[in-house]
Amino acid sequence: MATTVGEVIALLRDFAPEECGYKEEYDNIGLILGDESRPVTRVICCLDVTMSVIDEAINTGAELIISHHPMIFYPISRINAGDILGRKLLKAAEHGIAVYAAHTNLDFVRDGINDYVAQLLGLHNVTSLSPYIDGETGFGRVGDLANKVYCSVFKGEVEAVLRDGYVRTVGEPYAQVKRVAVINGAGGGDTKYVDMAIKAGAECLVTADVKHHVAVYALESGITIIEPQHFTMEYCYMARLVQNLKIEAKARKADIEISLSQAEKNPRY
């Protein structure tokens, strides 16, 4: 019997349950487009559902796209070909392609994106900045480097592990850091996240999309920020997502092919 959209979603829920995210607050986790009863033979995973990814799904015969960022984030009042979102939704629907978003649940869950970035950065004794299910599940992460290093040296390590040549720094480059907070994605959008990192004892916050007023606030608060790109800070996990889904599919004997999108690219260069 063919595997269905709903059964593939169940594989994801095994390691990233929707209740681990902010589904009821502002997020849009779940099946964005499609029918859970439709059969699936091929799945593509990506960070963003771009038109290129939809075309890739069409050309490769994929019936399901699993993305990190929701294709529909805010409520919409119409779907038509007059705007890019409408064209994408219509094209995916026309070709029978379902779209599922695993957003903040994949950020916050144990062994999700935040934990993976913390692991890449070599942090130890990692806990959540703001746990709400247990000590390891929740918003952000904080942990310790093996030794104190200059901020400029740590910046180079961030560039290397995230393969990002456009990492920026807020603060004194020769400040020494050991305790590091990690908020994958747009943690640079609000000063409250800087306060959370300081409260957790962090000397450095690694996050993306730092607004000017947040940078000024961090500088005056005495904490350094290392700012990789949003894309690189989250895309690094996508191959791990594919691997986790394959493990779950094999355990359940689901006959599906799961792959990482080859069409997706960083919008900034």
Image: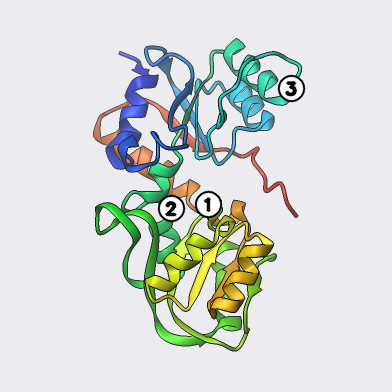
Q: Residue at x 31, y 35 (%)?
A: 13
**Between marks 2 and 3, how big is the CA–CA gap?**
31 Å
Q: What label sits on residue 83 in the rendered view? A: 3
Q: Nearer the viewer, mark 3 or mark 1?
A: 3
Residue type at tag 2: Ile
Residue type at tag 3: Asp
Looking at the rendered structure, the secondary structure element under dot 3 is loop
Q: What label sits on residue 234 in the rendered view? A: 1
Q: Name the residue tied to disc 2.
A: 113
In this view, 232 is above or below 22: below
Q: Nearer the viewer, residue 11 or 221?
A: 221
Q: Nearer the viewer, mark 2 or mark 3?
A: 3
Looking at the rendered structure, the secondary structure element under dot 1 is helix
**Between marks 2 and 1, how big is the CA–CA gap?**
7 Å
Q: Residue 53: where, in percent of width, then height?
A: 63, 31
Looking at the rendered structure, the secondary structure element under dot 2 is helix
Q: Residue at x 60, y 53 (%)?
A: 230
Q: Residues within 10 Å of mark 2 (few under 14, many from 20)?
A: many
Quarter of the image with the C terminus is bottom right
